[in-house]
Amino acid sequence: MSVDVSIPTILRSYTNNARSVQGAGSNLRELISDLDTQFPGIAGRLIEDGVLRRFVNIYINDEDVRFKGSLEASIVDGDAVTVLPAVAGG
């Protein structure tokens, strides 16, 4: 199983500047683990203390994973996963 993962500019240093990468897993936790195997260090930018970092938003097919089970959110072949850093300012 493979899914497309869109990577934000701020994390592309981990993916050799790739805007999109392929990953595998039946849920978000497994997908992030697979990405970390391919791109060491990226998991630490997404997860802290076993949960999603507060200022990282991840969407599966345009749905916020925090409403789909967070790291346990199911992923199926062909899904599109988007990682977005939260933006603050004023």
Image: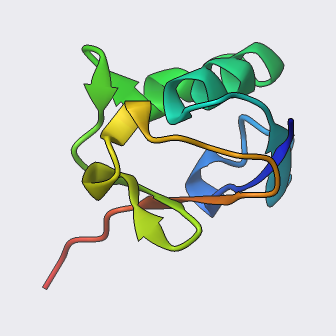
- Left or right: residue 9 compared with residue 46: right
- Left or right: residue 61 compared with residue 24: left
**In this orientation, which residue lies closer to the viewer: 88 or 74?**
74
Point out residue 62 in the picture as x, y percentages from the top left corner: 51, 74
Q: Residue at x 86, y 35 (%)?
A: 1
Q: Residue at x 72, y 21 (%)?
A: 34
Point out residue 12 in the picture as x, y percentages from the top left corner: 71, 48
Q: Residue at x 56, y 32 (%)?
A: 27
Picture layout, residue 89 above or below residue 36: below
Q: Residue furthest bottom?
A: 90
**In this orientation, which residue lies closer to the viewer: 21 or 60?**
60
Point out residue 48 in the picture as x, y percentages from the top left corner: 30, 22
Picture layout, residue 44 above or below residue 70: above
The image's colouring method is rainbow
- Left or right: residue 1 compared with residue 88: right
- Left or right: residue 24 compared with residue 41: right
Asked whether residue 17 is in view, the answer is no
**In this orientation, which residue lies closer to the viewer: 90 or 86?**
86
Write down the quadrant of residue 89 in the picture: bottom left
Count how many numbered circles sit on residues in the image.
0
Location of the C terminus (image quadrant): bottom left
Write down the quadrant of residue 85 in the picture: bottom left
Point out residue 31 in the picture as x, y percentages from the top left corner: 65, 30
Asked whether residue 8 is in view, the answer is yes
Q: Residue at x 81, y 57 (%)?
A: 78
